[in-house]
Image (tube, rainbow, N blue to C red):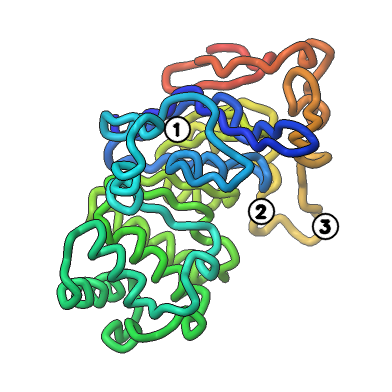
Amino acid sequence: MLLEVENLTSHFFLDEGVLRAVDGISFDVNEGETVALVGESGCGKTIVALSLLNLIPSPGRVVGGRIVFNGEDLLQMEAERLREIRGGGIGMIFQEPGAALNPVFTIGSQISEVLRLHRGLNRREAEAEAIRLLGETGIPEPEKRIKAYPFEFSGGMRQRAVIAIAISGRPRLLIADEPTTALDTTVQAEIVDLLRYLQAQHKMAILLITHDMGVVAEMAERVMVMYTGKIVEVAGVCELFREPKHPYTSGLLNSIPRLGAGRKEPLRGIPGAVPDFLDLPSGCTFHPRCPIGDESCISEFPSLRSISPERKCACYKVEAG
């Protein structure tokens, strides 16, 4: 087991109250595996990623749980050791490549900084390796591009540069937070292919955080579905797409546009919206939007229980079998 997360809980302490962004989730990622964490925007996916590296912005913080990476509990280790893990053992592709890159430094200097910090390379070695990484991530003429600034790159090229930075420390786990968001369809496909290639080359595990079920189908082996800070379903990717169990998962899959559906068939969505985390419904927080919910769903949130080998679901209406 490369990563084991147990009862992870992250809260934001606001004047209006306590916002429970991540509410006691548990999962694991094996060596070389791709696990996807999916859900609507605002369900807590990015806070999970930031929690793993203890990067939650104030007034948020991790308030409970265990995060064990390669046998070490990240929540218990010294700050210096945690800095070694960030960018070294665990790399991260942040959601907005434009915001992740410093606009006043060249692309090459930003990659070189990670190489010197985590791999101990000198200036000349770091520059040569930065050029190689830019080439590996598909940026043309890397010898010239290394001197460019982020504003001189297109959106797709900035994403490739961010990926180069994320893998420069030779991580064993890569956290990819919405790696294809805001890119056109062709570039999205190229980024997915690039991540799969780099995973095979570097033998990395990937925690893929996305709301794009098409990317999940292309990359993931297992899928975790998240809603209002909790995981509501876990399944193999083929099982999930073939037979979703949780009503929320069914809603996500039904909302995907179908090729050839015709102009007269409307897009299907999930009624309502993700509720306010400061005023969550009682019981199962999905029940106000659920097509099969009833009075039995409002007492308490259902536990995430095994309903078959390698499959879990948090729903009172789903039977084991």
Measure the C-alpha gap from mark 3 to mark 2. 12 Å
| Image x and y of residue 79, in percent | 36, 42
Residue beneath the point at 36% across and 59% down: 166
Q: Relative to 50, does residue 95 appear above or below in the rendering?
A: below
Report crowding for label 3: few under 14, some 14 to 19, many 20 or more residues within 10 A (C-alpha).
few
Residue beneath the point at 52% across and 39% down: 48
Of callouts 3 and 1, the N-terminal one: 1
Q: Amino acid at mark 2?
A: Arg
- Image disc number at residue 1: none
Nearer to me, 18 or 107: 18
Of callouts 1 and 2, the N-terminal one: 1
Secondary structure, mark 2, is loop
Quadrant containing the N terminus is top left
Residue at image mark 1: 236
Q: Nearer the viewer, mark 3 or mark 1?
A: 1
Report crowding for label 1: few under 14, some 14 to 19, many 20 or more residues within 10 A (C-alpha).
some
| Image x and y of residue 102, in percent | 47, 72
